[in-house]
Image (cartoon, helix red, strand yellow):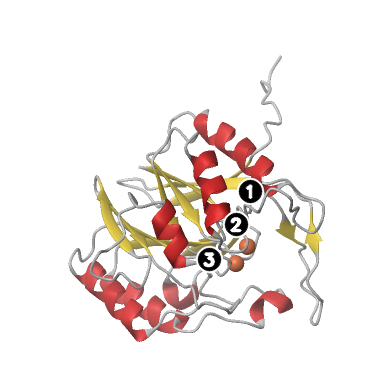
Amino acid sequence: MIVAQISDLHVMREDRLAYGALDTRAFLLRAIDRLNTLAPRPDVVAITGDLVDEGSAGEYARLRTCLDGLRLPYRLVPGNHDARAPLRAAFPEQPWDREEPEFCLFAEEHGEVLLVGLDSLDPGRTAGLLCARRLAWLDRVLAARAGRPSLVMVHHPPFATGIAHLDGLPMEGAAEMLAIAARHGGVQRVVAGHVHRAMGAQPLGVACTTCPSTAHHFALDLEPGMRARWIPEPPGFQLHLLQPRAATVTHTGFIEDFGARPTKP
Ligand SMILES: [Fe+2]
Ligand SMILES: [Fe+2]
């Protein structure tokens, strides 16, 4: 099974540009074109939050129009820039758990693989939160399918990145979430966004990755005390290969096609 991932689309109102410079909707359309031409076709596209920028119904309508052009099934989780009610209203067909209407949660089987959508949104705050209710839900859905290969989508990564301005606001409940994932086994990856860079870590023994943005990135600033800086590095996506008899692998690719050439003339 191949799960493609894109993240941090930050679709905005028509008259807005990110940092006054970037048309995030145009970047998303390019990402969709790229995903539509991938071979082999991914089974599903995981879109890990910051879908829009201000959480308005108008932004979700613009996002919907873009994603209607994606010729692959996709699943959404909210980020700190999202708002649950207009997100759910714009995407009513997403498999949101109806027993948890306060959140945007889902657990869905794709063949052998369980895809879990976790909601780390804490309205009004940049930092993520996994409250006791969401953690209990995760515990239940993983317990119901113990040991099954699983991929957990969540916007905020459950680890410190080494980039100071990102680590100042850690996700509450991260350690508890990792303990649940480790206890049930089968969790192949926790796939996150939010940090606008590709990273990998293994906190408490749980493999976690973050996906580049379809638009803009944060600079690779590992010096302590650095203030946030954005950088127009190439937008990207990831492919998570869940292989029956081998380790799960995460590939990072670019939206732009740089043109593959044969190694021998
Ligand atoms: Fe973001
Ligand atoms: Fe975010």
Residue 214's label in the rendered image is 1
- Are the residues flagged by discs 3 and 1 in contact, CB closer than 8 Å? no
Q: Which is more toward the observer, 259 or 53? A: 53
Q: Report x, y in % for residue 234.
A: 73, 46
Q: Earlier in the sequence, mark 3 or mark 1?
A: 3
Q: Earlier in the sequence, mark 3 or mark 2?
A: 2
Q: How many marks on residues? A: 3
- Are the residues flagged by discs 3 and 2 in contact, CB closer than 8 Å? yes
> Along the horizontal axis of the image, is 133 left or right of 236?
left
Q: Which residue is mark 2?
A: 8
- Category of crowding for the residue at label 3, using alpha-carbon neighbours closer than 10 angstroms: few (below 14), some (14–19), many (at least 20): many
Secondary structure beneath disc 2?
Answer: loop
Q: Which is more toward the observer, 189 or 82? A: 82
Q: Is residue 137 above or below residue 66?
A: below
Q: CA distance from mark 3 to mark 1?
A: 14 Å
- Category of crowding for the residue at label 1, using alpha-carbon neighbours closer than 10 angstroms: few (below 14), some (14–19), many (at least 20): many
> Along the horizontal axis of the image, is 235 left or right of 113?
right
Look at discs 3 and 1 and give the one toward the viewer. Answer: 3
Q: Is residue 72 above or below residue 13?
A: above
Q: CA distance from mark 3 to mark 2?
A: 8 Å
Secondary structure beneath disc 1?
Answer: loop
Q: Label 1 CB, ligand 1: below 8 Å?
A: no
Q: Report x, y in % for residue 194.
A: 59, 65
- Are the residues flagged by discs 1 and 2 in contact, CB closer than 8 Å? yes
Q: Amino acid at mark 1?
A: Thr
Q: Which residue is mark 3?
A: 79
Q: Amino acid at mark 3?
A: Gly
Q: Amino acid at mark 2?
A: Asp
> Along the horizontal axis of the image, is 263 left or right of 154?
right
Q: Residue at x 78, y 61 (%)?
A: 230
Q: Is residue 240 above or below residue 101?
A: above
